[in-house]
Amino acid sequence: MNVSVRGRAALATIAAIVLSILAGGRAPAAGEPFPLTAILPLTGTFAFAGQSQQEGLQVLQRFVNRTGGIQGRPLQFQFLDDQSSPQLSVQLLNGVIASGAQAVLGGAGAAQCRATAPLVVHTGPILYCISPAVRPDSGGFVFSSGVQPFDELTAALHFFRDKGWTKIAFLATNDASGQEADSNFNDLIKRPENSSIQVVGYEHYAPTDINVSAQISRIKAANPQALVIWAAGQPIATAFHGMHDGGLDVPVVTSFAMQEYSAMDQLAQILPTHLYFASSKWPAYDIMTPGPVHDQLATFFSAFKAEKITPDAGEQLAWDPALLLITSFRKLGPNAKAAQIHDYMESLRAFPGTSGIYDFTTGDQRGLGLSDVVLSEWTPTKRAWIAVSDAGGAALKPNQQISGK
């Protein structure tokens, strides 16, 4: 593969990291920055997500360094741009592995994670994918961030049933993320609890398609009460354009991949009237009861408020994986090896994060489940996502609170 100028610059950055870590074979001095690499799509199709994640990690870095760093050493994230390319992700990760890194954050998309996971799954270093749309091998060195699409869709269908929306349409891209959602949706629709749901429209499109007018026309003709759209970046914008231009305005639920202020602002004129997102518990903070998750979210929001930033799903999705790795290094020391970090993380069963209570003893390499999923609705007048379901997808009753435990 030919690497672009930006790609060559990223590879040069890796070389600098290698030199800084291995120079002369010396041990890092006390107070010397502790590097932790994050491979993110800072440009390309998924740049909106990568840039939010980078901002979140920068806020976390400053917070960690205000609270002691890594056993006295200041944390310093090293950001590498994979340009939303799985091929470049592989090249960048190979370089980071060569540097001797024991843990890496990376892979904001399912395709990037699936491309890089085979490099480390059995031997390390730790690769914490900042994407929920992968299923890491149990016991391996790959971990996945956020709630998984299967649980998101389970909660969404529960919410649909509670709202009385039983005529459902489905629209997804045919890339890795869309295929994952497609498989999950087909499995879930066969479950007894979803027997009342009728799938009246079932459509797909390529991420590179510039319009979906034919798919939207067929969905509209089927007269659905609600629509599931599973896509991210420019592809979901294409779907919203198709709905707007085709005169289809029904409630839509999607993943939290687009739960970004920048996306909501950019697409404001074409968004459906009712747009729901399935995510972890963070949008329910304002109606959450006291507890360890509420406490973690209080810290999270305070850290951003101090910098006059209002965080969204991008910042939140990157926060917990980085916090888990930082906690591991603080516990085990900055020289901890990948196997030690792996064993420590796999032993955690009650770790409070901003997404929920993590339990890695299940072996799913994720630590979160259906009990950590809530639905929220984008509310333009408040410029906020307002929780509309309890954990698991049951529609909220008036004045109901969500557990912060």
Image: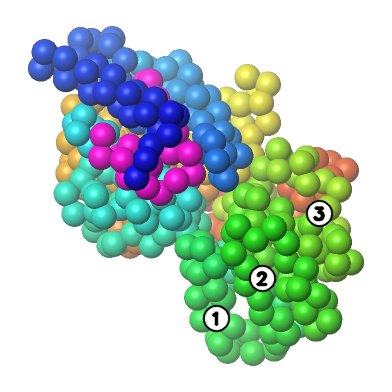
Q: Which residue is found at the position 18% from the left and 27% from the top?
A: 335
Q: Earlier in the sequence, mark 1 or mark 3?
A: 1
Indicate the colouring scheme: rainbow
Query: How many neighbours does mark 1 have within 10 angstroms: few (below 14), some (14-19), or many (20 or more)?
Result: few
Quadrant location of residue 401?
bottom right
| Span highlighted in magenta in the image | 75-95
In the structure shown, which secondary structural element does the residue marked by tag 2 occupy?
strand
User: Do we see residue 291 in this rendering?
Assistant: no
Q: Which of marks 2 and 3 is nearer the N terminus?
A: 2
Q: Which residue is found at the position 86% from the left and 61% from the top?
A: 245
| Amino acid type at mark 2 | Leu
User: Do we see residue 114 in this rendering?
Assistant: yes
Residue 398, percent from left and from top: 81, 60
Residue 186: numbered disc: 1
In the structure shown, which secondary structural element does the residue marked by tag 3 occupy?
loop
Quadrant location of residue 390?
bottom right
- Answer above or below: position of 404 versus 28: below
Asked if the residue under mark 1 is in contact with the one under mark 2, i.e. CB atoms within 8 Å, the reply is no
Asked if the residue under mark 3 is in contact with the one under mark 2, i.e. CB atoms within 8 Å, the reply is no
Q: Mark 3 points at which residue?
A: 271
Whole-angstrom CA distance, mark 2 to mark 1, is 12 Å
Whole-angstrom CA distance, mark 1 to mark 3, is 26 Å
Q: Is residue 130 left or right of residue 153?
A: left
Tell me the mark number nearer the camera, choosing from 2 and 1.
Answer: 2
Q: In this view, does 265 lie to the left or right of 330?
A: right
- Answer above or below: position of 201 versus 209: below
Quadrant location of residue 39?
top left
Q: Mark 2 points at which residue?
A: 171
